[in-house]
Image: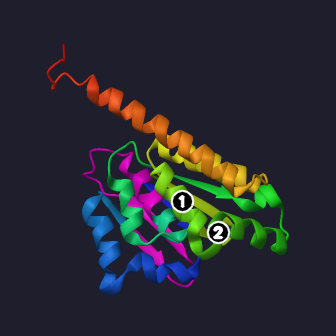
């Protein structure tokens, strides 16, 4: 496969292109792809360059385009370039709450929180990035970070109280720190303590 097609909201096209094409150019510079953007429809064609050695980078480019389309700033979307461990996950809230605008607004409000505080806490505690845009919640991070953020968001969608979600996040953050410390402790580069 050498081409992928993505549709993003028309109001996000300008962000994807960037000032004087800077964002589009940056993506094409960092990844072996060419982006063709139709600013009328929001259709984006991502083509893998012929000399590309790693065809999976086509999917990385797709994720970056999708992330920008789902409300992330280009700088935050570029976190996906931080290695293969980084991923984008998109939760379509319509799958959970149906098509009711009022339910959608209520759930989005709960995920964002007063002055954006709940979204901030989810990001802070999980290490993932979260964007609530349109009818979706998008998450960027490594596998563990995305898993923790997804679980917290699903708890909020399911009606859990914010305090319960924050306790869950605190617990997961401690587990993550402990696990990463143990990995670091077991590193062969460190002298073993007696």
Residue 125 placed where, x, y %? 49, 51
Give the residue drawn at x 19%, y 18%.
193
Quadrant of the rendered image containing residue 16: bottom left
Residue 98 placed where, x, y %? 84, 62
Mark earlier in primary sequence (1, 2)? 2
Give the residue drawn at x 57%, y 50%.
149
Structural distance between the alpha carbons of marks 1 and 2: 10 Å
Read off the residue under disc 2: 113
Say what secondary structure mark 2 lies in: loop
Quadrant of the rendered image containing residue 23: bottom left
Quadrant of the rendered image containing residue 92: bottom right
Residue 112 position (above or below residue 38): above
Q: In the image, is residue 56 part of the stretch drawn in magenta?
A: yes
Say what secondary structure mark 1 lies in: helix
The label on residue 121 is 1
Of residues 17 and 180, the one nearer the viewer is 180
Q: Which residues are magenta?
A: 35-64
Check whether the beta carbons of the residues at disc 1 and disc 2 lie within 8 A of each other. yes
Local crowd size for mark 2, using a 10 Å CA cut-off: few (<14), some (14–19), many (≥20): some
In which quadrant of the rendered image does the C terminus lie?
top left
Residue 191 position (above or below residue 109): above
């Amino acid at each position: 496969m050498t081409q992928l097609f993505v549709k993003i909201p028309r109001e996000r096209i300008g962000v994807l292109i960037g000032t004087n094409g800077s964002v589009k150019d940056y993506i094409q510079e960092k990844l072996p792809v060419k982006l063709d953007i139709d600013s009328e429809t929001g259709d984006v064609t991502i083509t893998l360059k012929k000399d590309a050695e790693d065809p999976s980078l086509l999917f990385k480019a797709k994720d970056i385009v999708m992330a920008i389309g789902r409300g992330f700033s280009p700088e935050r979307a570029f976190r996906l370039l931080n290695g293969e461990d980084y991923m984008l996950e998109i939760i379509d809230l319509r799958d959970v709450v149906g098509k009711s605008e009022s339910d959608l607004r209520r759930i989005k409000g709960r995920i964002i929180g007063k002055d954006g505080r709940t979204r901030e806490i989810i990001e802070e505690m999980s290490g993932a990035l979260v964007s609530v845009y349109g009818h979706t919640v998008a998450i960027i991070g490594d596998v563990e970070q995305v898993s923790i953020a997804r679980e917290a968001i699903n708890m909020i969608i399911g009606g859990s109280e914010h305090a319960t979600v924050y306790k869950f996040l605190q617990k997961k953050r401690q587990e993550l720190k402990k696990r990463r410390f143990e990995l670091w402790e077991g590193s062969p580069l460190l002298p073993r303590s007696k």
